[in-house]
Image (cartoon, rainbow, N blue to C red):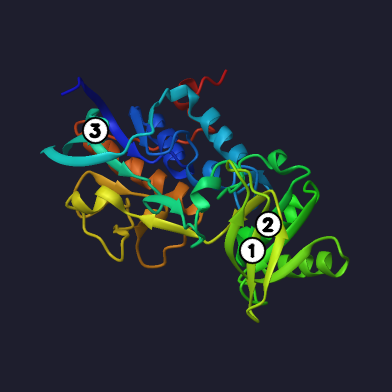
Amino acid sequence: MSDVIKTDVLIIGAGPCGLFAAFELGLLDMKAHFVDILDKVGGQCAELYPEKPIYDIPGIPQVSGQGLTDALMEQIKPFHPTFHLGEMIETVEKIGDPAFRCTTDAGKVFECKVLVIAAGGGSFQPKRPPVPGIEAYEGTSVHYAVRKMETFRDKSVLIVGGGDSALDWTLNLHPLAKRITLLHRRDEFRAAPHSVEQMRALVAGGKMDLRLGQVTALSGADGKLTGATVKGNDNSITEVDCDTMLPFFGLTMKLGPVANWGIALENNLVPVETSAFETNVPGIFAIGDINTYPGKIKLILCGFHEGALMSQKAHRYVYPEKRLVFQYTTSSSSLQKKLGVN
């Protein structure tokens, strides 16, 4: 067994909610380590829409997924959290009251007094379209997320889907791409009405193409896409010239090993009480999209609120003999000193 890493708090998931939780914990002198299955911080914000604008972060009219991640990383710098990326917690063993021993799939072992599950919906992966041989093009010509918009400049892009992601990227990539073709199985969309109106205006103006049907085959050698075969709703077979394809069929959420940790589950989510967002296991908390409670709304700002209240309760476990005095960062010289404020 590898050397045990001891920490006050272990946070599973380095998305926005987990990152802000490290800030709240740090203000209360609690050290945090992170484990995330992704190879970078930011969770879904960084993985699925790093350049897509977010409009509902309080006080920030517009910020990209990557921009929000960068800002949160800057905010928690004073507390020096440690990140263990590309790993997944497989086992959680109770060794105290509370205290936990957590082991990753890479054999890394942590011991902590508090465990915070901030893993979004669990581990997630894009749904793969049922197109024969699509695997050969993945990562080169077929992409399930847009990480850098510039990658699609002057490309002939086939976007497949009818939800918000498909419509958003149709509109966002249109100024860059050589040509955009949007393919959906029917002429009705699940996206925001305004986005659908904008898309239809581009089609009416001859600035992009809209096709109805499904992709049945791909063509091209060595992972380089040259076209897609489309079966129309009238059973007609046509070819769409494209060198890049973006299928947006949603995500498959997998709760993964969390289901084996002795925590109560409800429809693949973790029920929590709402004073501190603690699970049925004392010392294990769940914040962000992975938890559920009456009135739950899956917004980043709600996850921030959950992280703040969680930290207050976590302090009791980490420092049982220490009285917690609530302070404001605007007026507390001791908190400002921790943040490096002059």
Question: Left or right: where does residue 179 sit relative to residue 128?
Answer: right
Query: What is the CA distance from the residue labelled 3 to the residue labelled 1?
Result: 59 Å
The quadrant of the picture occupied by the C terminus is: top right
Amino acid at dot 3: Val
Whether the residues at callouts 3 and 2 have beta carbons within 8 Å, the answer is: no
Circle 3 residue: 318
Task: Report helix, strand or loop for mark 1.
Answer: strand
Circle 2 residue: 158
Residue farthest along the bottom direction in this orientation: 234
Whether the residues at callouts 3 and 1 have beta carbons within 8 Å, the answer is: no
Residue 233 x, y percent position in the rendering:
63, 79
Q: Quadrant of residue 87?
A: top left
Residue 111 x, y percent position in the rendering:
20, 30
Residue occupying image coordinates x 50% and y 53%: 133
Task: Report helix, strand or loop for mark 2.
Answer: strand
Number of marks in picture: 3
Amino acid at dot 2: Leu
Q: Quadrant of residue 168?
A: bottom right
Residue 307 x, y percent position in the rendering:
40, 45
Residue 143 x, y percent position in the rendering:
58, 48
Foreground disc of the pair 3, 2: 2
Upstream in sequence: badge 3 or badge 1: 1
Query: What is the CA distance from the residue labelled 3 to the residue labelled 2?
Result: 52 Å
Upstream in sequence: badge 2 or badge 1: 2
Q: Which mark is residue 229?
A: 1
Whether residue 96 is visible here, answered yes or no, is no
